[in-house]
Each structure stands twice: as C-alpha cells, then as structure tokens.
Amino acid sequence: MIRYWKKDGATLSAVDGPGKGVWIDVREASRDDLVVLEKEYGVLPEHLQDLLDVDERSRIEKEDDYTMVILRLPMYDPRFEVEYFTAPVGIIMFKDRVVTVCATDCEALQDLSSGKVRDFSTANKSAFILRLMGRAAILYLRYLKDLNRRTALVERELQRSVKNNELVQLLAISNSLVFFTTSLRSDELVLEKLAKSGVVRFKEDESELLEDVATDFRQAIEMANIYSDILSGMMDAYASVISNNLNMVMKRLTIVSIAFMVPTLIASLFGMNVSLPFMHEPRVFWWILGACLTAGTAAALFLRDRRRKPRKALLGPAASGLVLPRDQA
C-alpha cells in the first residue's frame, strides 16, 4: 500500500499524490506497488526484490538517479513463535523526494507517519534518515527491555519446575536476541559509512543528532550482548539441572532394580523343579517370603545414598573472628 506524506510547518499530513518534498511510504508492498516504483520512479527491479528478501543485510547502494539505504529495523508480531525479529526497510532518496519500502508494517515507520517524532522533515533527506534510525534505536532498546522482563518471568517459572514450555520460550527469546545483535551491528556499520563516505550530506547542526543515534546503537548492541550472554548461561545451567535430575532418577531406579535382584534370586532358586531343602515343611513359604523381604531391605539399606556430614574445618584465630594481641599473634 502506497501512502503520501508531507510536512507543512509542524504538521504532517497525508496528500493525494507525489510531489516535491513528499515522503512516499510503501508498507506491506504488493506486486502492483513494486510495478509503480519500477515504472514511475525508475527503481531497479533487483533492488525491489532485495527489499522484499527477509534475509537481506543492511547496506548502501548508489545509482545515477537515487541512493538506496537498506536498514534492518525491529519488528514485533505476536502471531509468530519468535515475536521479536527484524526486517529490511529500504530508504530510496531521490533529489526531491524520499521513498521507503517495507514488506511488512513497521512500528518505526508508524511513529514517523503518526507525528510522534519531533523535528521530523519529509524534505530534508539527511534529517529523515537520522530520525528514522534514531527511532529504530529507541525501539531496539525498548524491545530488549521487554525481552529481559520476559526472561525474568520465565526464569521464575523455571525455578518452580523445569518444563518444556518455558524452555521453548527461552529459545524464542534467544533467537530474537540473535536477530537483534546481527541487525544492530549491520545498521551501525551503515551509520558509520553514511557519516564518513559523504553519500548523505549531514548539516552542521545534525552532527549532535548523528552522535546521539550512534550512541543509542552502541548501547543497544551492548545490551543485546549482555542479555544474550545471561540467557546463554541460564540455559546451560538449566540444562545441567535437567541432566542432574535425570541422573538422580536413574540412580534411584538402579538401586530399586538391584534391591529386587536378591529376592528374585531366592524365589528363583526355590522355584526350581528339583528336590530342595525344607520342601516338605508347611511353613517354608513364609520363611522364603521373610528371607526375600530381609534380603531386599538389606540391599536397599546398603545401596542407599549415605551422605556424610561435612567436617568442620579447623579455623584459625583470624577466620573465627578472634583478634589476638600482638604478642600472641
């Protein structure tokens, strides 16, 4: 769907068609939208295909009529198993207009079109891309905090009992952090290239905004790395807990099976179809049953987990908190 936006003064309003200083907003791009961009604006078809590729990396493409910047912006969609992910958004800058292309709907573009971003201009291309990247950095930080809160909730559930559902949630959060980390690094490289290469000429009063956006991206990268390391260590710890619980269960089952081996042996011996001692004794059945119970109980007691109490360490005066005079120290 193609929308047209233009800012007159402090108001951003929708207009009927393209023109000078108009932002052409293409979200949830269809086949007809791509045909319009190709025929009316001269965008190369291979560039349009790249913008619809979900795995496309951030980069800059310079052509004769336009400059295309591809960024990976954060997305949130509760319909998917991995709710937080990233998607490519293309910013095509012509001499007198800006075109953005996204295969889905993006919250960063929604914030721009709804007027939530201050000092946003559709005519100034350098300010446009800085405001968009700044908004994307803020969304990255907010989504990372949401992922951290979700991790804490899942961790509290796992402390009660280790379940498959919570582990699947942790895996989805881990995937989201991987998407964010890789996308943030590629976007940061694009921002550095924009600042140094001169593809987009930033004004002198925009240098502070450029530094603020770069700082937000570095902070988001550090947060994503920290959360990813914490989550990785947590999943390793719970994997060790699951393995230890399995070992304990197998140990108990082994003790039970060994404890039953001795009574089974006794019962098997007296179950042979040959002459046996006490075979004519009327109470021999109860003797054999008592022997089996005694042998099983003895085996279970012998194989039980006999944990020794830790010995008290011999503490010196300093460790026990006593302070001796200098002549006795």
Image (cartoon, rainbow, N blue to C red):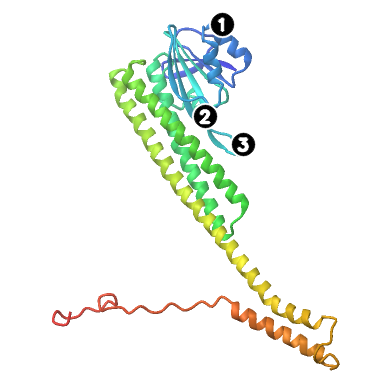
The tag earlier along the polypeptide, 2 or 1, is: 1
Where 147 sits versus 95, above or below?
below
Q: Residue at x 51, y 10 (%)?
A: 43
**Residue that mark 3 sits on:** 80
CA gap, disc 2 and disc 1: 28 Å
Residue 312 position by quadrant = bottom left
Q: Is residue 119 visible?
A: no
Q: Residue at x 56, y 75 (%)?
A: 305
Residue type, label 1: Lys
Please state the horizontal and vertical placement of residue 104, each as a whole percent of the image.
Answer: 58, 25
Where 27 sits versus 230, above or below?
above
Image quadrant in which the N terminus is located? top right
Please state the horizontal and vertical placement of residue 160, each as a whole percent of the image.
Answer: 57, 60
CA gap, disc 3 and disc 2: 16 Å
**Residue that mark 1 sits on:** 39
Residue type, label 3: Phe
Q: Is residue 313 left or right of residue 15?
A: left
Please state the horizontal and vertical placement of residue 268, each as a whole percent of the image.
Answer: 78, 79
- Which tag is nearer the camera, tag 2 or tag 1? 1
Q: Report the disc number at residue 107.
A: 2
- Which tag is nearer the camera, tag 3 or tag 2? 3
Q: Is residue 154 visible?
A: yes
Image quadrant in which the C terminus is located? bottom left
Q: Residue at x 36, y 20 (%)?
A: 194
Query: How crowded is the residue under tag 2: few (<14 C-alpha within 10 Å), some, or many (20+)?
Result: some
Numbered disc 3: secondary structure: loop
Q: Residue at x 42, y 41 (%)?
A: 225
Of residues 108 and 84, the one nearer the viewer is 84
The tag earlier along the polypeptide, 3 or 1, is: 1
Q: Is residue 308 left or right of residue 104?
A: left
Q: Exactly how many numbered labels are in the figure?
A: 3
